[in-house]
Amino acid sequence: MKRIIFLFAVILMAVGMASAQGAKKAVLAVEQNVFDFGTIKEADGPVAHTFVVKNEGNAPLVLTRVVASCGCTSPEWPKEPIAPGKTAEVKVTFDPKDRPGMFAKTIALYSNGKRGSYILTLRGKVIGE
């Protein structure tokens, strides 16, 4: 009886490991998740940075939502799926108008490649006119 239970447990573990290895999954990765503009002048107007997002999984990656922490920051992202091993760009623009001083703005990426959100950050210092 012990042998049958042991054999059943071994078969169950082998099937579980085989199915986990064959599962297709998208994996979101970003080489640089924080960008520092340094010191920028309010009078120079909006500044932008492009983050490169990579799909390190074996299934297409879809960015379902990209949300900025404030109305002064606006993201642009690809709506089409990102193939495994490929990259895409998420461009984020920050408007320093009427925002002198230090700033740190976050951008949340929601996708099928990560549970919850993946956070990107823009930071720097705005000097007045």
Image (cartoon, rainbow, N blue to C red):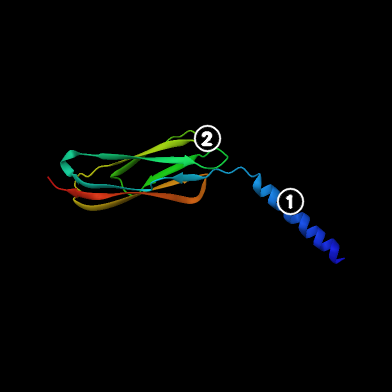
Give how far across and how far down residue 104 sits, in percent. Answer: 29, 52
- 54 relative to 51 in the view: left or right: right
Q: Count neighbours of disc 2 (C-alpha within 10 A) and say few if under 14, some if 14 to 19, many if 20 or more.
A: some
Residue depicted at 50% across the width and 39% down the height: 62
Say above or below: 86 vs 42: above
Q: Which residue of the protein is positioned furthest toward the top in this rendering? A: 80
Q: Is residue 64 something that shows in the picture? A: yes
**Which residue matches tag 2?**
83
Amino acid residing under circle 2? Ala
- 51 relative to 7 in the view: left or right: left
Q: Count neighbours of disc 1 (C-alpha within 10 A) and say few if under 14, some if 14 to 19, many if 20 or more.
A: few
> In what element is the residue under mark 1?
helix
Residue depicted at 61% across the width and 42% down the height: 24
Q: Distance between the residues labelled 1 and 2?
A: 28 Å
Give how far across and how far down residue 86 sits, in percent. Answer: 49, 35
Residue depicted at 24% across the width and 39% down the height: 46
Amino acid residing under circle 1? Val
Give how far across and how far down residue 99 sits, in percent. Answer: 21, 49
Which residue is at the front of the view, 124 or 116?
124
- 112 relative to 5 in the view: left or right: left
> Label 2 near label 1: C-beta < 8 Å?
no
**Which residue matches tag 1?**
15
Among the two numbered marks 1 and 2 on one chain, the one whose residue lies closer to the N terminus: 1
Residue depicted at 25% across the width and 50% down the height: 124
Q: Is residue 77 something that shows in the picture? A: no
